[in-house]
Amino acid sequence: MRQTGRLQKMYETYGEKADFWWIYIQEAHATDGRRPSKKVKIALHKTLEDRKKAAAGCSEASRLKVPVLLDDMQDTVSNAYSARPERFFILGADGKVAYSGARGPRGINLDALEKRLSELTTKE
């Protein structure tokens, strides 16, 4: 995930006003996957424990303090939200999607994400 520093600052700014979660899904560029990355050294997750270890490693490496949740091994969240390889969503207080970002990494627009987050948290 790119721009984790900026995401961390958003968490620090809005974390008291909104619940933040980072949902770790299937690794997009696993070493033994279809499109391996030279930078990422994570194998395909075979168990939930594998996914948990990979998520912890990514959080530590990126210094991201946003709480992490894990998608299940059937990739339920990723499939439901078309989240692969990465994507940002904001759910409103009513549980409905209040912001749906484009697929990342190229489609990520942190300015738009922060603008919508600001709008939603200043209404309260």
Image (tube, helix red, strand yellow):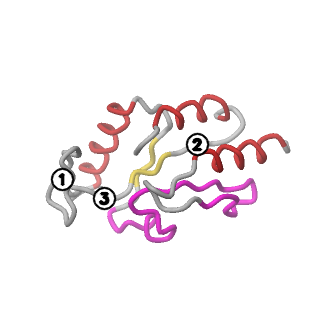
Image coords of residue 117 (percent x, y): 70, 45
Q: Is residue 10 left or right of residue 95?
A: left
In this view, 62 is above or below 118? above
Pointer 3 residue: 28
Q: Secondary structure at mark 3?
A: loop
Callout 1 amino acid:
Ala
User: What residue span does the magenta drawing correspond to?
Assistant: 73-100
Q: Quadrant of the C terminus?
A: top right
**Residue tagged by mark 1?**
43
Instruction: Write the residue at 33% across / 38% down.
Output: 56
Q: Outermost residue toward the front?
A: 106
Tell me, for residue 20, which label it has, or none. 2
> What distance separates the C-alpha of mark 3 from that of mark 2?
22 Å
State the image quarter where residue 61 is shown.
top left
Residue 20 among magenta residues:
no
- Mark 3 residue type: Ala
Relative to 80, 118 lies left or right = right
The local crowd at label 3, few if under 14, some if 14 to 19, many if 20 or more residues have their Cα within 10 Å, is: some
Residue nearest the observer in this picture, 111 or 30 = 111
- Residue type for callout 2: Phe
Mark seen at residue 67: none
Helix, strand or loop at mark 1 = loop
Residue 29 location in percent, x, y? 25, 56
If you read the primary sequence from the N terminus, does the residue marked by circle 3 or circle 2 appear first? Answer: 2
Which one is closest to the eye, mark 3 or mark 1? 3
Q: Is residue 86 magenta?
A: yes
Along the line of sight, the residue nearer the viewer: 79 or 6: 6
Residue 3 lies, in percent from the top left, at 46, 39
